[in-house]
Image: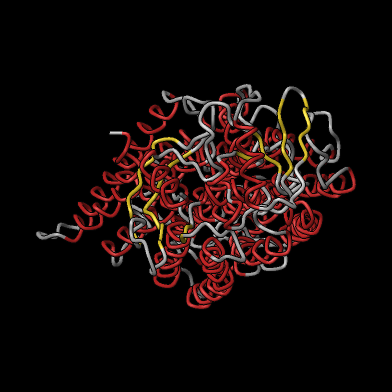
Amino acid sequence: MQTWLLTAIIFSPLLGVLLLWLPPRGSDRSIRRSALFYSVVTFGLAVFALFKFYGVAPTDSQGDPKYLLQHWSYWLGDVEVMGDVADVEILYHVGVDGISIWLMVLTAFLMPLAIWSSFTSVRTRVREYFSLLLLLEVGLLGVFCAMDLLLFYIFFEFTLVPLYFLIGIWGGPARRKAANKFFIFTLSGSVFMFAAVLFLAYYSYSDSGLALGYITLNIEKLSQLAHAGFISTSVQWWLFLAFAAGFAIKVPLFPVHTWLPLAHTEAPTAGSVILAGVLLKLGTYGFCRISLPMFPHATMTLAPFVACLAIAGIIYTALAAWVQTDVKKLVAYSSVSHLGFCILGLFSLKITRVNGAVIYMINHGLSTGALFLIIGYIYERYHTRDINEIGGLARKMPWLTFFLVFFTLSSIGLPGLNGFVGEFLVLLGTATSNTTNDLRAAGPLGYGYAIPAAIGIILGAVYMLWMCQRVLFGPLKEPPNTPDTSTGLSADLTGREIFILVPVAVLCLAIGVYPNPLLDTFTIATEQHVLRTPASHSWSVTEAGDDLQEEIKRADPMRLVESTSVNNLERVSVGNVGSDDLSTKKLGITPVFSSYPVTTPGMFLLNPVTKSSVAKTDHPETDAMTDGRSR
């Protein structure tokens, strides 16, 4: 069951789309209910996967880190083809760790709420609308589960298509401009990202690159090789910049953020909820899953530059939000400001601080997604989002007032609510990044980055509370002939709308009061798969040391070999390794991940149990083929 579980989660919304279009075609009411049911089924599967995840150890029998709930099958090429034809190991490979499992659950949780919120707001092309929402969910779930770079890229780009049509067809007056701008910005960054994927495929096979003897885009394997020093610093630089072009636009980072406010403003309510709650996390998740573990040298060097862009975005978009009169555009600018904190936490390169960035992603998805829901409820009744045209709504809408104030306080980081946890950890991590108190190498940031970022938090509180004061309090202001209750709405929130917001509010409170269950899960994933900390089990010197020495001498008698005992660990420096005559598969060794980043290429630690290679995965079949191909 575990093997196919993630595949079932990813493609269950696609099955829902097919069922929506099968005859006999029902009424709009039945289509809405069916779409909601299919999304709830996906959420149920995601919760089941979460329980399965916690029931499986995060390491294998030897203590090595592993992704869980994995499934893989050959997709492009056949690794058993030998001879003149290059082997290709492009897999359909899915799996999750403590970071991706929660982002997957967040996606599956928000989609039913977004669909349910659209029951009264969408009146035309109902079948197409809900089909596109379900298709969008397929792409989002696939990104968080993909463990092959090509598969990741396909899902990453697939999300562009349904959201483009959602904005372009069901959006506001400037919907075509917003959809085209979103498409052009996102596709432009993806061109560089795809070039980097192609180069990594070539580099894995090329004699001047990793010289594996076969083409692979396995994320886990490439990350291991990168941390062992097999990807040169210059190559890491260019690859980091190419991937960053795609991820930075998706976050979005300043100054490539200009597509987001317009897209948010013109998108339908459900589109804004998913865009803010999940889609923007594809960029931060991409940095976390690919850029940090796969290009450690480039990450360390370029982190200050990325942090400066994040801080510029935090302050600039906070000031831009302050002067907005459209409530939705105000919250849209706040999203750019908030996600700048996620980038700061990630590039502090400290475990606890990266955890803060990840929990910030989840918190932002909950609180900002809820704010867009509430703004959508206001727009359905008053057909305007202009702060100058509405005000004093607390007198007529006590339920809406309660939830708007609650999620505003959550967004600005009130202690006791979820936003505070992420902001505290990120600012603490940014300020202490350059320390070694955690027994890790000093990171690239420090107080010089934390102080201006803290100004962004103050500005965030100012413009969000200002918005609440103008919309909810003061004299009552309503456009003529409003509120509109023709679609079955009441003056205040209906029971359906309250029920949509209650679970989000409960989660915001629960995370704010007791975040540790999430942080514990993130810690394991951050140590093992992002910053690549060594496995927790002990290592010792074995007879493999003599074998290694002899293998190096046969490969190159002139090569210097140094052996140094540090903390009972046998560490061997073999200089520039990775060529055909001296590959990790031949030597049977695993890399030392002693600190972040790896400062000395070619550092390895002997595995006393299996002499497993750097490229070892959780699949015995793949490992056997890899070892056979090396021999």
Q: Residue at x 52, y 56 (%)?
A: 212
Q: Residue at x 63, y 24 (%)?
A: 539
Residue 425 image point, x, y percent: 73, 35
Left or right side of 436 for 463: left
Residue 563 image point, x, y percent: 76, 35
Q: In the rendered view, would you say 78 is above or below 553?
A: below
Query: Within the image, what quadrant is residue 159 found in?
Result: bottom left
Residue 621 visible in rendering: yes
Residue 460 visible in rendering: no
Residue 53 image point, x, y percent: 42, 30
Query: Within the image, what quadrant is residue 77 found in?
Result: bottom left
Q: Residue at x 21, y 58 (%)?
A: 18
Query: Depth check: 9 or 607 in front?
Result: 607
Query: Depth check: 606 or 306 in front?
Result: 606
State the count of labels: 0
Left or right side of 25 for 56: right
Q: In the rendered view, would you say 512 is above or below 164?
A: above
